Amino acid sequence: MQNLSLIPLNNNIDKLMGFIPSLDKSWRGSQRIKSSPYQVETLDAITNLQNQGWQISGAREVRDKQTRKISNHLIKLDHPDFQIKNKSGNSEAIASMRLYNSCNGTSPLEMDFGVFRQVCSNGMVANTSYSNYKVKHTQKGNDNLYGILAKANTQANLVLDEFNKFKSIELSPFKAMALATDAARIRFGNTTQFDVNQLLESIRPEDEGNDV
């Protein structure tokens, strides 16, 4: 699934429809975007998830490079009841879900479960994916959709369990240095021109300690 910048929406469904009109079947018809007769509607999934406590945090549309018509949309939701807080009481990670769907049914609705977390003190964030579901635009896909959505909160809990497993893994100084060296080599190439120890310095409270 693509990593794209999103329009912030603050769980406002009206704002979502204003910025992402391709969610509306009627609008797609007015733009001569022919959807599958068994189109799995993203809006139906969003409404169901909101009823389970998920909140819309961002969205965007993607245009076809050749026709310039809107071809896909991406919606990100977070669940405030499934998050991990640091020692200061601030959110370190929150369960997130990305819905990625084609407007004409050529590719399935994707549901990507993961963890959304701040990774730098300057506000940079990362979304780590743990599981992914694909629902095809068929009758069977429509029948299966709500069964998958019904497991969303259970899946969110499992995602945070996986995140906590990594936090519980303690690295020895030797292993921490080896990991930092490998990371520097991937990022910068020649590590002789870079002080690897800088990668091991703690800047934020959640960076303290030797866990992964």
Image: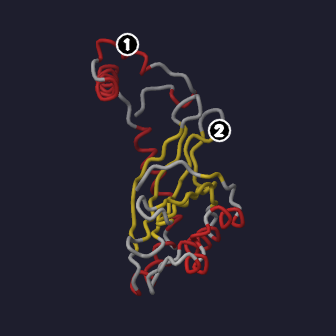
Q: Quadrant of residue 78?
A: bottom right
Q: For mark 1, what is the residue?
A: 195
Residue sitting at x 39%, y 66%: 133
Quadrant location, the C terminus: top left
Near-viewer residue (140 or 2): 2
The residue beneath circle 2 is 90
| Kind of residue at badge 1 | Asp
Q: Point out residue 26 in the picture as x, y percentages from the top left corner.
A: 60, 81
Residue 53 x %, y %: 64, 64
Are the residues tagged 2 and 1 within 8 Å (C-beta)? Answer: no
Which of labels 2 and 1 is toward the front? 1
SS for dot 1: loop
Circle 2 Cα neighbour tier, 10 Å, few/some/many (<14 / 14–19 / ≥20) = few
Upstream in sequence: badge 2 or badge 1: 2
83 is higher (above) or lower (below) than 54? above
Provide the secondary structure element on which disc 2 rests.
loop
Q: Is residue 3 left or right of residue 7?
A: left
Q: Amino acid at mark 2?
A: Asn
The x, y position of residue 96, in whole percent, is 53, 55
Q: Residue at x 40, y 41 (%)?
A: 166
The image quadrant where one finds the N terminus is bottom left
